[in-house]
Amino acid sequence: MNAPDKMIASASRRNWLKAAGALAGFTLVAGPSGLVMAADAVKYGGDNMPGGVVDDALVFLAIGSDGIVTIMSHRSEMGQGIRTSLPMVAADELGADWAKVKVQQAAADEARYGSQDTDGSRSMRHSFRAMRHVGATARLMLETAAAARWSVAVTEVKAAGHQVVHAASGRTLGFGELAAEAAKLPVPPRASISLKRADELRYIGQDNKRGIDLHDIVTGNTHFGIDTRLEGMSYAVIARPPVFGGKLKSVDKTAALKVPGVLRIVELAGSPPPAMFNPLGGVAVIASNTWAAIKGREALVLEWEDGANGAYDSKAFRATLEAAVRQSAKPARDQGKTVETLAAAPAKRKMSAEYYLPHLAHATMEPPAATVRVINGKAEVWACVQAPQATRSNVAKALGLPFDDVTVHVTLLGGGFGRKSKPDFAVEAALLSQAMDGKPVKLTWTRDDDLQHDYLHTVSVERLEASLDAKGMPTAWLHRTAAPTIASTFAAGANKQAPFELGMSAINVPFAIPNVRVEVPEVPAHTRIGWFRSVSNIPHAFAIQSFAAELAHAAKKDHRDYLLELLGPARRIDPKDLSDGWNYGEDPAKYPVDIGRMRHVIELATAKAGWGRKLPKGRGLGLAVSYSFVTYVAAVIEVEINAAGEVLIPRVDIAMDCGPQINPDRVRSQIEGACIMGLSLAMSGEISFKNGRVEQSNFHDYAVLRAADAPRVIHTHLVPGTLDMELGGVGEPATPPIAPALCNAIFAATGKRIRALPVGMQLAKKA
């Protein structure tokens, strides 16, 4: 059994199924399309993210009589390339020709595919070995069929290049020629399945620039959620309560009903907090086209009851958070005698700093959109969702339908970042279709809707204190982190960061410091808080990596050298020894915190960036490192501050160690995308509140990074990995070190320390 094989539990049944039914073992189904294979219902990995999601990697593969291999993609495609990368893995083990591979998107069906949630940088991490076994099992079935036809031992034949070859006689049979015969064979036991050696692989570990969707995206032939068109479809937008938890007091529909194209106006009941995946309520305008629906909404005369969050004010809440971190609180990690050591240290050997990060919006380029048709007691959904199964269950509940009578078709996502894991917009569309007597309705969120009613990334104040020895190294480390928790979205009264949030670069800070204490004050949430790209790693890493740079400067030491000294010698740390019982849902024995790997990405990034080189006045290099989603990333950013005070970024170097890279081209693109997003958040990202209302409404006041402000070049440096290593995440880990590296670079260039985000595009304009 190969090393990766040991990761997979044995299946309880390996029965042959000739038609649909309970899945057991690898299943082959004979039919007009040829050979169909499904993977075991085996748990390949788990996590403790909100919602209690468990990843059961169930995937399908089919071979038609024409030889075309169709591979089911059970995860959502939102730019990360998973619809290419996962099928590529199965195709490689199968021995397929990539030019003869097609990909089909799976509908929501946990019974068949396991968890389809696309979040937590887990899709490849949890499905890689499952997809290898899908391909390897199909390969053995085809080889067995060919051997039987030729009356030779199966060990004498080999599947490669989309055919099975008998080298001794030179005979070959194409996959399509063998599919029907292979479908009649019993499924081989798992112990007989062997995965290919690394030197036998053609696609795994190689750049795949022929992505399944690339041509259609470039030519405009793709189907995003917002692209859905059905016969007889109506279009809708919704006026929602401007304050979270508010509700409709009165509405005058008279003028709106006179707008040409408006068909119906529907009042939607809201739900009191916690938000979960429930609609906010409000008034929907349904029309013959989206523009008419928008104009009809503008004509509504609305009066709202704001409710308990009507006084929410960002400036006042920042003061609340600051007050919270200036008082002692219950610790989540308490190693050594931090409080006593800090109290005994002389003032000249103590440092403290506070860091502020505002609410952030996902601002996906495609705002939420869903189309639903309810007919004959059954609902059909087309939507750009990251959580197809949650969509299915929530739509069924809202409509009062049996779960099995709801079908969810997953479209491409024009960005996700965690926002589209919350399917409230699909539920809204379902309720509107029901109100239209089952006729299809497409609901579109405008950009204003998207920014003002998002499940926002949390606002945060982080306070750090340290006592220092004579060499400027910490003898004690105190971190107080105050932020509304994502748990408030799921449980009323939740006012303290959950273990999974604290396990994102806070309690598990891996510095070699004898006394470490992390405290968590209680603070309420006044708006919807949701998952975000890299989640709580963003505020925690910003504070910790900025503070480490401040300590290095105070000690008059080079930042890179100081950071390496803080980390200490190469060693592997059990996350539980850092009070982290979550560890991104992974087995700590397989995923320890590896300080050697963290040191290496720092050394690699700084070497490639030319750390220590002499720079002209107004330029500086900044460094930060992060361990998130079981991956190690270091970033070095070079900034230039011109005469107008503008922040220019000539160069960024990012080193990543995520273990083996299955599709390096997509790994690099994700690093680049995370860098751009991280800079956008750091330089201009801020959602603020006044009188309970979001003050931003579009990209003019919630700016995303423009091409002119982007780095002139982003260099990505991947640490090689082997297939016997555990896989790390890719989509999220490069985001956290970007903001602190940027601010550390600005300090190196100007001597100005930035502890509150956003930075602003022009330092001269920052108050």
Image (spheres, grey):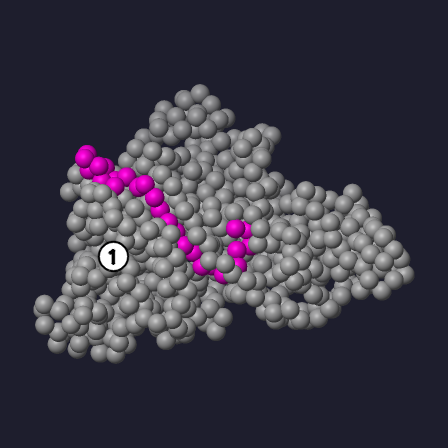
Name the residue type under label 1: Ser
Q: Nearer the viewer, residue 108 or 176?
A: 176
Residue 742 in view in this figure: yes
Residue 332 place in picture, x, y as percent: 30, 71
Query: Residue drawn at (75%, 60%), measured in percent from left and top?
Result: 140
Locate residue 201 relative to residue 214 in the image: left or right. right
Residue 29 in view in this figure: no
Query: Residue drawn at (25%, 48%), measured in percent from left and top?
Result: 614
In this view, which residue lies farthest toward the right?
Answer: 151
Residue 95 place in picture, x, y as percent: 71, 53
Q: Quadrant of the N terminus?
A: bottom right
Locate residue 132 relative to residue 322 in the image: left or right. right
| Highlighted range, magenta | 640-664
Q: Is residue 567 above or below residue 77?
A: below
Q: Quadrant of residue 451?
A: top left
In this view, which residue lies farthest toward the left?
Answer: 347
Residue 485 place in picture, x, y as percent: 33, 58
Q: Nearer the viewer, residue 254 or 124?
A: 124
Residue 26, magenta (yes or no)? no
Residue 641, magenta (yes or no)? yes
Q: Nearer the viewer, residue 496 or 636?
A: 636
Query: Residue drawn at (65%, 56%), measured in percent from left and top?
Result: 201
Query: Residue drawn at (47%, 48%), measured in percent from left and top?
Result: 668
**Mark 1 crowdedness (10 Å alpha carbons): few <14, some 14-19, many ≥20:** many
Locate residue 494 relative to residue 439 in the image: left or right. left
Q: Nearer the viewer, residue 763 or 56?
A: 763
Q: Label 1: state its secondary structure.
A: helix
Q: Which residue is mark 1?
A: 546
Q: Quadrant of residue 602?
A: bottom left
Q: Quadrant of residue 651?
A: top left
